[in-house]
Amino acid sequence: MKIISWNVNGIRAAMQKGLGDFLKKEDADIVCIQETKIDHAKTFPIDGYPFVFWNCAHKKGYSGTAIFSRSKPFQVYYGLGLKHTDEEDDEGRILVGEFEKFFLLNVYTPNAQRGLMRLQHRMNWDKKFFTLLCDLEKKKPVVFCGDLNVAHKEIDIAHPEANRHNPGFTDEERSDFDTYIQHGFIDTFREFHKEPRQYTWWSYMFHARQKNIGWRIDYFCISATLKSRLKDAFILPHIMGSDHCPIGIVLKE
C-alpha cells in the first residue's frame, strides 16, 4: 500500500501545475493533501479516487485538508474532537480516515507565525493532537502525515543556528515532536535515510530550492506496531508545483 502526502499550497493552482498527472504516475492507494485553500462550494471529484473527503477552513482561501482514497474508509472524522462533520474544526487542519488496519490522520499543523505570535496556540494544539493520537492508538495502530510545521532535528534544516528561535524550529515545537517519538511513534523517513540535506520545504525567496536551502517539515509517522509492515519511506524533491514537495510511505499488505 502506497500513501502520499503533499502540501500543495492551493489545490486549484496545483491542478494547473500537473497534480493530476502526478497522481496518475505515482498510482498511490491513498493521497493526503494539505493547504487546499478551497471551500466546500468549490470542491470537486478527483480522477482515479472514488472516495474523496474534504475538510475546508471557514475562512476562504485558507488552510484545509483532503483525503483521496481508492478504498472506502470505515469512518471519516474531522478535527481534534473527532466529529463526523467539520463544524468544530474551522481551520480544516485534521482529517481522519479509519481503515481496516489503522487510523490515518492527515494533518496541517498551525504555524507559530512571525514573531512567534501564535506559539502558545501552536503548543496547545500540539498537546491536543498528541492526546488524540494516544486515544486512537488504543483502538488500532496510527499513521499520521502532513505538514507538521517543525524541523525536528538540526539535520532537518539547512541553517539550524540562524533559525534557532524562528517559527518551526523553536525549542518548544521541537520538544513537542520529541513527545511523539518518545511515546513510540516512528519518523518513517529516518528509518531509511540518515543523511543530511533532505528537505520538503523551501522558501520562494533567494533561489532557496535551487540551492537546496530547505527544511524537512513534512512527515509520515507510524505506531511502533506497524514497523514490521514499513517497506519504504521517501521524499520527492524533484516534483514541483508547490513550495513543499510530496512525501510517501509504502506499507506491506
Image: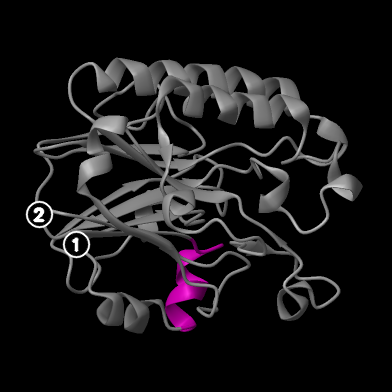
Name the N-terminal-most of marks 1 and 2.
Answer: 1
According to the picture, the residue beneath numbered tag 1 turns out to be 29
> Camera-side residue: 132 or 158?
158
Left or right relative to 74: residue 94:
right
Vertical placement of 239 versus 115: above or below?
below
Around disc 2, counting alpha carbons within 10 Å, would you say few (fewer than 14), some (14 to 19), or many (20 or more)?
A: few
Residue 85, image x and y in percent?
28, 30
Cβ atoms at labels 1 and 2 below 8 Å apart: yes
Q: Residue at 77% of width from left, 77% of height from top?
A: 211
Q: How many marks?
A: 2
**Looking at numbered disc 1 in the image, what kind of residue is underneath it?**
Asp
Q: Residue at 91% of width from left, 49% of height from top?
A: 162
Q: Quadrant of the N terminus?
A: bottom left
Q: Residue at 75% of width from left, 40% of height from top?
A: 169
Left or right relative to 221: residue 135:
left
Around disc 1, counting alpha carbons within 10 Å, would you say few (fewer than 14), some (14 to 19), or many (20 or more)?
A: some
Circle 1 — which element? loop
The question of residue 53 being in magenta is answered with no
Residue 113, image x and y in percent?
77, 39
- Front of the two marks 1 and 2: 1
According to the picture, the residue beneath numbered tag 2 turns out to be 71
Image: magenta residue range: 7-17
Residue 83, image x and y in percent?
29, 24
The question of residue 13 being in magenta is answered with yes
